[in-house]
Amino acid sequence: MSVVLTEQTVLEKLKEVEDPELGVDVITLKMVKEVRISGGSVSLTLELTTPACPVREKFQEEIRSAVASIPGVSKVDVTTTARVRATRPFDQQGMPGVKNVVAVASGKGGVGKSTVSANIAVALARSSARVGLMDADIYGPNIPLMMGLTGLPPLKDQRIVPAENFGVRVMSMGFLIGPEEAVVWRGPMLHGAVNKFLKEVLWGELDYLIVDLPPGTGDVQLSLAQSIPLSGALIVTTPQDVALQDVRRAISMFEKLKVPILGIVENMSSFFCPHCGKETEIFSKGGGQRAAESAGVPFLGKIPLLLDVRIGSDTGHPVVLTHPDSPASIALWETAQNLAAQLSILAQKEQERFKEVWKV
């Protein structure tokens, strides 16, 4: 007697497959869409929690193998889409359409935080996510240069329209002042600028808003955390001890502000000679990973120091686009994917907490 293949049979089998990041089965997560059966052929759509999923291929293969093991199945076709989930109710904070706001911070200057911010934003956008990049470094706004932008579009309904390049919407104080003009502001004026950048800019629908913070633990960081409930913070460091001391201060600040730490990324982890290809650990080794382990937070990646990264930042052509096969570019793509994965995990935890509180 032949077995009748049904959609319910497929769905029951897929309860055995868990999202490798979230640890919950794909049916509970409602990730399986449009199951179609024709004879022994099964096709379905898998809706990922981010288009920048770091385990997309592995996930697809697990789904394909599970369905293929069902008696009577001769062919399996898995199509993937993505729907990014929100970690906070930003629509209630004057930012409708924004799902995740990530602060990129460093305890000290000179660690390449803006370079990491720009390249992560571009990498996420190239994965088909909707991305904004807010330059909150009011005193040293370098993001326009790094993103190859010089000005803003005209106002719309008396509101600021962000500039756009490489699929990323960008706002920065650098658009509003001259290239050699200094911003000399006290705390209240900084708070006002941050609030305007968040709530008076037409960001539109965004999966991720990356906020490049100034170094340290000052007024802008406090203003940002007070203005909106951040999804979390990404800490950028270099391997040497003096930078790692400041990492601990940055983590302590965000903990006091009740902002989740999404992870640590180690920039300038080693230098690759452009002539001989030899790798040299100029700033020591493994400090970022040790700091992450010590703080009990994820380590999201280490990015080598390459000439192409500096050239890309200076010319407004992010290295993830100009040299996609370079070690630095690959590391930045992986960091962006790992960051997206951490946000998916956080969104799932928030959803579970909501269900627990409201008993739904």
Image (cartoon, rainbow, N blue to C red):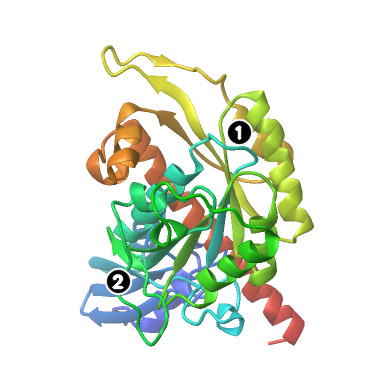
Residue ID at (69%, 51%): 218
Measured as percent of width and height from the top left, residue 317 is found at 27, 45
Q: Nearer the viewer, residue 141 or 56?
A: 141
Question: Of the residues tagged 2 and 1, which is closer to the observer?
Answer: 2
- Asked where in the image residue 44 lies, by quadrant, the reply is bottom left
Q: Nearer the viewer, residue 131 or 74?
A: 131
Q: Residues within 10 Å of mark 2 (few under 14, many from 20)?
A: few
Q: Is residue 42 left or right of residue 353?
A: left
Rounded to the nearest angstrom, the CA distance separating label 2 from label 1 is: 41 Å
Instruction: Residue under label 1, please give it.
Output: 289
Measured as percent of width and height from the top left, residue 273 is found at 33, 16
If you read the primary sequence from the N terminus, does the residue marked by circle 2 or circle 1 appear first? Answer: 2
In which quadrant will I find the C terminus? bottom right
Outermost right residue: 256
What amino acid is at disc 2?
Pro
Q: Secondary structure at mark 2?
A: loop
Measured as percent of width and height from the top left, residue 179 is found at 39, 49
Q: Residues within 10 Å of mark 1 (few under 14, many from 20)?
A: many
Residue 358 drawn above or below residue 69: below
Instruction: Residue under label 2, please give it.
Output: 153
